[in-house]
């Protein structure tokens, strides 16, 4: 991975190579830690973080859900991310990874006395599913792993522990020759990708499953807003696997994945196997927003 100069750790900027933790760090053993994935784009007016407030709020909500008491406020965390990007002098798009975790000091599951630590890293990161993927679409496999059910894990939290499920689904899909996994829920309906929410288009209608079994995706929310503004009919409802196979278009949304077209699922070609018309329209609209080219949404950007 591309390194940066500094990582922010509990209020201090630490040299990248010195940002270390003890092997008995609680989160390393039991997986209770929460994180965010946020992007900053190099706009015409310099680097700008997209939806800093929303991502930071979700981080704090994730901590609340997993019974971690944060040691920094929303405002302090926002300022820390700005400070980090300023000090690193980035010249290209970056990905920001804030992490609140339980540090070294106690072992055993009951974590009330574990020290809460916060780290924020940022580094240059291009498109998660490839430049080619953004243009031509990616190949997707329905996963044999069911998405973590709401009855046992709490999917509104972007919690490290939830990602074992995503990680195994992704591994399986890539090993089988695909680029991404699409997970079903407990009832066999479409839940989400390993790190993305999913949309399909049928007869001009844009459909995305409700967030019952997916993260409350910030990108999905933005794309829905842009679709509404463009007068596209939207449905939020369950989608079955076979409905994806016969969709005219399909795409993933996520901070990392941005708006990535899906060109086939389980070797069923979606539409004509290319980025569809509505996908193209929404992808362009999304990039216009994050790159500060749409004046209506400039307030969503925090310029560094
Ligand atoms: C499991 C999962 N679903 C959906 C998303 C998309 O969420 P967002 O658009 O807020 O990045 C992500 C990425 O954060 C994710 O990890």
Image: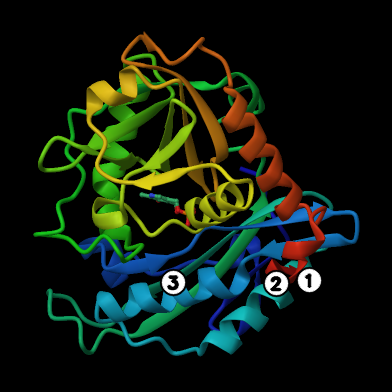
Marks 1/3 in contact by CB < 8 Å: the verdict is no
Ligand 1: does it lie within 8 Å of the C-beta at label 3? yes
Tell me the tag on residue 58: 3
Binning the other alpha carbons within 10 Å of mark 1 as few (below 14), some (14 to 19) or many (20 upward) gives some
Tell me the tag on residue 84: 2
Residue 184 occupies quadrant:
top left
At 66% from the left and 35% from the top, the residue drawn is 281
Q: Is residue 107 left or right of residue 76?
A: left
From the top left corner, tell me how far across and down residue 285 is, in percent: 69, 44
Q: Earlier in the sequence, mark 3 or mark 2?
A: 3
At 35% from the left and 72% from the top, the residue drawn is 62
Quadrant for the N terminus, please.
Answer: top right
Tell me the tag on residue 87: 1
Q: Earlier in the sequence, mark 1 or mark 3?
A: 3
Ligand 1: does it lie within 8 Å of the C-beta at label 1? no
Q: Residue furthest right?
A: 44
The residue lying toward the viewer, choosing from 88 and 255, is 255
From the top left corner, tell me how far across and down residue 204 is, in percent: 49, 30
Q: Is residue 72 visible?
A: yes
Q: CA distance from mark 1 to mark 3?
A: 24 Å
Marks 2/1 in contact by CB < 8 Å: the verdict is yes
Q: Is residue 14 left or right of residue 293?
A: left
Residue 158 occupies quadrant:
bottom left
Q: Secondary structure at mark 3?
A: helix
Question: How many labels were placed on the picture?
Answer: 3
Q: Secondary structure at mark 2?
A: helix
Q: Is residue 171 left or right of residue 85?
A: left
Q: For the residues carrying marks 1 and 3, which lies nearer the camera in this image? A: 3
Q: CA distance from mark 2 to mark 1?
A: 5 Å
Q: Is residue 105 left or right of residue 180?
A: left
Q: Secondary structure at mark 1?
A: helix
């Amino acid at each position: 991975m591309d390194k940066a100069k500094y990582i922010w750790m509990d209020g201090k900027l630490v040299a990248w190579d010195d940002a270390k933790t003890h092997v008995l760090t609680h989160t390393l053993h039991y997986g209770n830690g929460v994180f965010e994935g946020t992007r900053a784009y190099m706009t015409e007016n310099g680097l700008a973080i997209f939806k800093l407030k929303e991502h930071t709020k979700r981080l704090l909500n994730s901590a609340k859900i997993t019974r971690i008491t944060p040691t920094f406020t929303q405002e302090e965390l926002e300022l820390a991310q700005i400070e980090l990007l300023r000090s690193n002098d980035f010249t290209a798009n970056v990905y920001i990874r804030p992490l609140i975790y339980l540090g070294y000091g106690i072992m055993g599951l009951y974590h009330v006395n574990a020290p809460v630590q916060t780290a924020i890293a940022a580094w240059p990161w291009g498109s998660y599913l490839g430049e080619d993927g953004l243009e031509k679409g990616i190949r997707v496999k329905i996963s044999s792993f069911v998405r973590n059910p709401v009855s046992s894990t709490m999917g509104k939290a972007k919690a490290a522990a939830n990602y074992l499920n995503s990680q195994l689904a992704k591994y399986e899909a890539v090993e089988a020759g695909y680029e991404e996994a699409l997970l079903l829920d407990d009832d066999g309906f479409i839940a989400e990708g390993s790190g993305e929410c999913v949309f399909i288009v049928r007869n001009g209608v844009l459909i995305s499953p409700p967030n019952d079994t997916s993260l409350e995706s910030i990108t999905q929310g933005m794309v829905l807003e842009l679709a509404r503004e463009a007068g596209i009919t939207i449905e939020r409802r369950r989608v079955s696997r076979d409905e994806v196979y016969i969709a005219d278009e399909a795409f993933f949304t996520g901070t990392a994945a941005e708006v990535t077209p899906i060109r086939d699922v389980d070797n069923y070609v979606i539409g004509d196997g290319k980025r569809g018309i509505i996908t193209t329209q929404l992808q362009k609209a999304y990039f216009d927003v994050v790159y500060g080219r749409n004046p209506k949404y400039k307030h969503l950007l925090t310029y560094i």
